[in-house]
Image: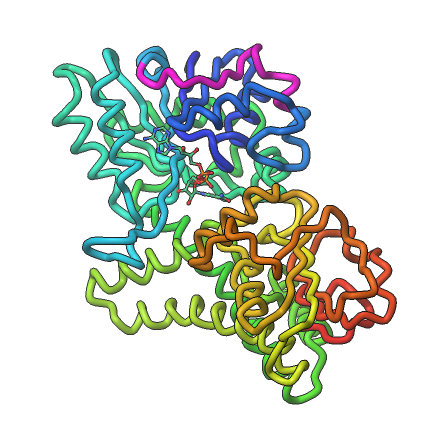
Amino acid sequence: MIKNICCIGAGYVGGPTMAVIAEKCPSINVTLVDSNHDKISAWNGDLNNLPVYEPGLKKIIKKVRGKNLFFSNEIDKNINKSEMIFIAVNTPTKTSGEGSGMAADLKYVIACAKQIAKASKSDKIVVEKSTLPVRTAEKIKDILCKEGKKGINFEILSNPEFLAEGTAIKDLYNSDRVLIGSDNSPSGLNALRKLIEVYSNWIPISKILTTNVWSAELAKLASNAMLAQRISSINSLSALCDMTGANTLELSRAIGMDKRIGPHFLIPSPGFGGSCFQKDILNLVYLCKFYGLDEIAEYWHQVVKINDYQKERFAKKIINHFGGDLKGKVIKVLGWAFKANTNDSRESPSIYITEKLFNAGAYIQIYDPMVPIENIKADINQYWNFDINTNDKRISFSSNNKINEDIDAVAIITEWDEFKYVDYKSTKVFDGRNILKKPFYSI
Ligand SMILES: NC(=O)c1ccc[n+]([C@@H]2O[C@H](COP(=O)([O-])OP(=O)(O)OC[C@H]3O[C@@H](n4cnc5c(N)ncnc54)[C@H](O)[C@@H]3O)[C@@H](O)[C@H]2O)c1
């Protein structure tokens, strides 16, 4: 039986996942470690300011923090004392070198493997929780065998995470499936049995799916690609609805009632965001190219291209309405998070759409109920290639969703529930999420 778990990476995946493991397995001590000291302090600090906002998370942290869930900067010590180590660090798109702009950057994962090799004085089960290109386990094993102490056995399991931000706790409590890929050797199967024991504390055995390591790694990329493909498919049709007078919601309802298709992920939007879909599809595209499958690479690449098209289309809808120029117009942007019920704005459509509106001359007022203003400013600095600290008078931040007289148009970009109940008066509302009954325009 596993007694101590260490998870490297206390972010959107590591935080909620380990909180649920700690809650459901009171006999296991779980420690989250991270190289970011501020993040660890925030996890140990005020419950109202945790680094990750997820409905239901605060309650679990309150219950288990300091009992069997701990947050620490002492990475080596916690690796060494644990029998099982999860790697849940970020795997962004590479920005330089071979595969730049497409392949996953594995530098953080490789740093973890090196650290585990260096710190381990006893056998370890290493669990890949991060989303990784197929065959990464081979690289990790290689590092552990070459750099680890002689006589220590390392087993690698692939256990990709399928939670969605905004519903992470619900998804973790009640997973559609838990996927674990392992080696078929006796020690691989032994490691697999130990991880199954952990999950079987709350997940029915029938939902724990075991495969080989490569299938598990690829299944995560493929799942995200299929989900994003549905969004791009309905978004591509929303453009045709605009031209023909067909109604996008009526269309998605009509399509989704077909049992073979189903209703999920068929609501038109200003494009998907989040840290995963784009990077994982680009990673898949890169893998296909690497294996010489150019047509397959192009097929999946279109999902990302349509997403870029959709963001552009929504911004243009607003700009064109005002005659191609927003000089002197005041636009209130409702929502900065990439979707509702999260404080995460990575790759949020808001970043790109608002930049277009700003570049067309508009005065921008930004409001989001959960994303801190500091994070919005950091996104603008990073993605717009624009220094907000020069204090451009055309960008301001609201602390509420109120629509004042001076506002010429509203752009709803995140589907926060509160935006359904705003008094929009006679302001022109461009509804990017189809949440209002009769907006001026819905996507
Ligand atoms: N966010 C999601 O919804 C989601 C869902 C499923 C899977 N994933 C995958 O899970 C992984 C993590 O994603 P995330 O959103 O939690 O990322 P994140 O950026 O929120 O968290 C990653 C954490 O790892 C830490 N870190 C990086 N390198 C480290 C090192 N060497 N030592 C210690 N700490 C280190 C960072 O400081 C950061 O706090 C990614 O591969 C992602 O694709 C994400």
* Quadrant holding the N terminus: top left
Task: Give the x, y percent position of residue 103.
Answer: 28, 54
375 left or right of 412 in image:
left
Which residues are drawn in magenta?
Answer: 60-76
Q: Relative to 367, say whether 412 is above or below.
A: below
What scheme was used to colour the molecule?
A: rainbow
Residue 75 painted magenta: yes
Task: Give the x, y percent position of residue 350.
Answer: 58, 59
Residue 39 vs residue 237, the one in the foreground: 39
14 left or right of 350 in image:
left
Which residue sits at x=37%, y=68%?
Answer: 301
Q: Quadrant of ligand 1?
A: top left
Residue 260 visible in rendering: no
Residue 285 painted magenta: no
Residue 41 vs residue 1, the one in the foreground: 41
Residue 43 visible in rendering: yes
Which residue sits at x=38%, y=67%?
Answer: 300
Q: How many marks?
A: 0
Task: Give the x, y percent position of residue 433.
Answer: 68, 64
113 left or right of 74 in image:
left
Residue 112 vs residue 398, the one in the foreground: 398
Residue situated furthest bottom in the rendering: 244
Quarter of the image holding residue 16? Answer: top right
Quarter of the image holding residue 328? Answer: bottom right
* Quadrant holding the C terminus: bottom right
Q: Relative to 276, say whether 181 is above or below.
A: above
Which residue sits at x=56%, y=11%?
Answer: 66
Task: Give the x, y percent position of residue 378.
Answer: 50, 47
Which residue sits at x=57%, y=67%?
Answer: 358
Quarter of the image holding residue 280? Answer: bottom left
